[in-house]
Image (cartoon, rainbow, N blue to C red):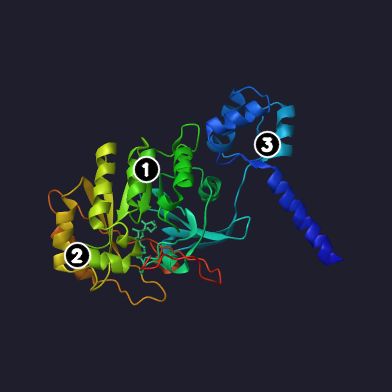
Amino acid sequence: MQERRRDSIKLMETFESQEKINLKGLTLPELENLVADWEEPRYRATQLAAWIYGKRVSNFEHMTNLPKRFRAKLMAEASVSEVRAARCTASDADVATKYLFELANGDRVESVLMRDQERTTICISSQVGCAMACDFCATGKMGFFRNLSASQILDQFTAIERDLSREETVTNVVFMGMGEPLANYDQTLKSVRLLSDLDGYGVSEKRITISTVGLAPRMRQLAREGLKCNLALSLNATTDGVRERLMPINEKYPIDEVLDAAKEWAVATKRKATLEYVLIRDVNDTDADAKRLRKLMNRLPCKLNLIPFNEIEDSDFRRPELNRIERFRQLIASARHAAPVRFSKGHDIAAACGQLRTDFGKPGIRMSKAS
Ligand code: SAH
């Protein structure tokens, strides 16, 4: 009997969530279409966007400039999604805080809040897991489960932001959490637009970075979007042989092609692309690599981020010694090329680059080397 009761409650919840339309993740034109369907004046859409995105309000009762009748309709037919952290772990000295979110369907993703003197950055996930199977990345080892919707991407942002003090604002958003953002192109772009819209969350486009393994056609598409966000390409090797071993995607889009695509993006947007290079001991950290990398960098307007490898489970890769990292940096640094070394924050809580992983008990879909 009790079982049956629980089932019927479950059914009701499903029914309710299917019936109600989630307004979070809708663009202003989409909100305009919706209010037109409801025979409301167009400016109601602007009012809704101002409440939901500008003021981060999700309770319709609090939207005081909307007529009571309209608020009642919204309560009956719409919702504004929110997610609460299932777990939140702070690193030493609070430089990084890792959030674990459990989505409505039970999927789990992680996001990271990082702070230094100048910036408050949220590192956001775009997928549950990742199919790219990069050998040095914990998310790559778990495989791909699902794309996140724009609202699920934005939910991570609002939940973390809610934890900040009144004086602190999020200055930067990086799509460097779980997943390959350009493999979930439409929802990623939608969330970038909503984050940076004046009617939206108001994060400057120039302070949003999409990081990619190098899906060349999507990088070229991004070049034509008219967005001022940053593009970071995870290069991670200077020869196709090594890159292929680290990143199976290199078989499809080799170094020449991803650099050409990054160049096309840089030329079209008049911005420098960022090349990311994870330094792995005895794999891609030799003097010859540094010299080749410097040469590759001459091919496009770019800057470089050197990321010392963060160790992960089930991997024999190691971080180079400090003096090797420093020598590599010096070989590249020149008047033309800055080569900052970015030690990831949150190493002690497994929140650093490439360490995000949620346990599903079974492997997801992974790109194989032969595919
Ligand atoms: N899929 C995207 C974004 C997620 S990874 C991409 O590949 O760019 C974000 C960055 O972390 C990438 O530059 C990646 O090369 C780096 N990274 C992955 N695993 C790492 C590890 N174990 N140590 C250091 N950096 C890592």
Q: Residue 228 occupies which quadrant of the picture?
A: top left
Badge 3, how many Cα within 10 Å: few under 14, some, many 20+?
A: many
Looking at the image, the residue that sits furthest to the top is 41
Three-letter code for the amino acid on which mark 3 is drawn:
Phe
Tell me the quadrant of the picture where the N terminus can be found.
bottom right
Dot 2 or dot 1: first in sequence order is 1
As drawn, 291 above or below 30: below
Three-letter code for the amino acid on which mark 1 is drawn:
Arg
Calculate the distance from the C-alpha at mark 3 to the C-alpha at mark 1: 30 Å
Q: What x and y, as percent, mark residue 211?
A: 36, 52
| Ligand 1 shown in quarter | bottom left
Q: Residue 108 occupies which quadrant of the picture?
A: bottom right
Q: What x and y, as percent, mark residue 193?
A: 45, 38
As drawn, 19 above or below 280: above
Tell me the SS state at disc 2: helix
Cβ atoms at labels 2 and 1 below 8 Å apart: no
Cβ atoms at labels 3 and 1 below 8 Å apart: no
Q: What x and y, as percent, mark residue 361?
A: 56, 72
Q: Is 72 in front, or is 22?
A: 22
Dot 2 or dot 3: first in sequence order is 3
Would you say 370 lies left or right of 321 here? Answer: right
Cβ atoms at labels 2 and 3 below 8 Å apart: no
Dot 3 or dot 1: first in sequence order is 3
Dot 3 corresponds to which residue?
60
Dot 1 corresponds to which residue?
207
Q: Nearer the viewer, mark 2 or mark 1?
A: 1
